[in-house]
Amino acid sequence: MATIKVTVWNEYRHERHNEHVAGIYPEGIHNAIAGYLKKNDTFEVKTAVLDDPDHGLTDETLDNTDVLIWWGHLAHHEVRDDIVEKVRNKVLEGMGIIVLHSGHGSKIFQRLLGTQTGSLKWRDDGEKERLWVIEHGHPIVEGLGEYIEIPKEEMYGERFEIPAPDELVFISWFEGGEVFRSGCTYRRGKGKLFYFRPGHETFPIYHHPEVLKVISNGVRWAAPTTGAKASYGRVEPIEKIRSAEGN
């Protein structure tokens, strides 16, 4: 099986400024996720953070990334627009991207989906969450049962202002009664996007084995096909990009 090159990108602010979060993720959320993925021999994993030069998303890094995992929350506004555009173009060319939790507010998520807000209801009371599997047989849910249960998590509730997903893989239910589209897939150009909701920084979500399994499955699903990989480094004519995006 061919190696999949993964870059785990993290804002890395909460862990450095909040003692509670640092206690859960002493090496950062990015390293918690990367550490799990590195157990898979078919993944080649590196990390990058917001305060790296070019946010760690240099041309060399992106040229050698099959799937980019994105976690952000506090500092969406600090991500440079030229870097966002560069990442977007890579997705259109075939790179996969997995956007986690509060990444719904990131520039790259909104740029790829065409939404300006991604607004939703939220409540941080540490409620139980059940992520119900909607698409049994989808590669992203391989090895899971009917649902994933998380004992304590931040609530996200509908209405979630996003375009209708190509595939709805998970729906969450919370103790307060709200529901949320927690696992959504999209295709943009030659690339695949997976939005996966769990991941509030004050809870040990990225130590949960089934959550990590979903991310691992998502990497395999989002990895570009051979044809898409062959297009890396070539800029498509703008007419083909607009057509692929449905513009």
Image (tube, rainbow, N blue to C red):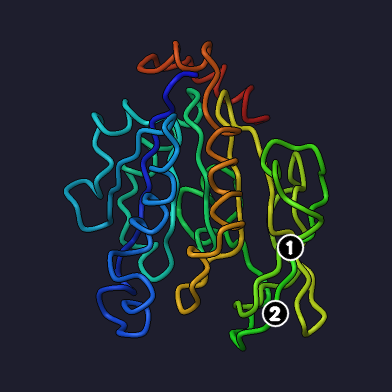
Asked whether, in this view, residue 61 is left or right of residue 221, the answer is left
Rendering coords of residue 1 (x, y %):
50, 19
Label 2 with label 1: CB-CB less than 8 Å: no
Asked whether, in this view, residue 245 is left or right of residue 227, the answer is right
Q: Which label was assigned to residue 128?
A: 2
Asked where in the image residue 232 lies, by quadrant, the reply is top left
Asked whether 82 or 49 is in front, the reply is: 49
Kind of residue indicated by mark 1? Leu
Rendering coords of residue 18 (x, y %):
31, 82
Q: Residues within 10 Å of mark 1 (few under 14, many from 20)?
A: many
- Extreme residue in the bottom direction: 125
Between the residue at mark 2 and the residue at mark 1, the CA separation in whole angstroms equals 10 Å
Rendering coords of residue 61 (x, y %):
27, 33
Asked where in the image residue 120 lies, by quadrant, the reply is bottom right
SS class, disc 2: strand
Q: Residues within 10 Å of mark 2 (few under 14, many from 20)?
A: some
In the rendered image, the quadrant that contains the C terminus is top right
Kind of residue indicated by mark 2? Lys
Residue depicted at 34% across the width and 48% down the height: 81
Q: Which label was assigned to residue 107?
A: none
Residue depicted at 69% across the width and 60% down the height: 161
Residue depicted at 53% across the width and 66% down the height: 199
Q: Which label was assigned to residue 131?
A: 1
Rendering coords of residue 225 (x, y %):
55, 18
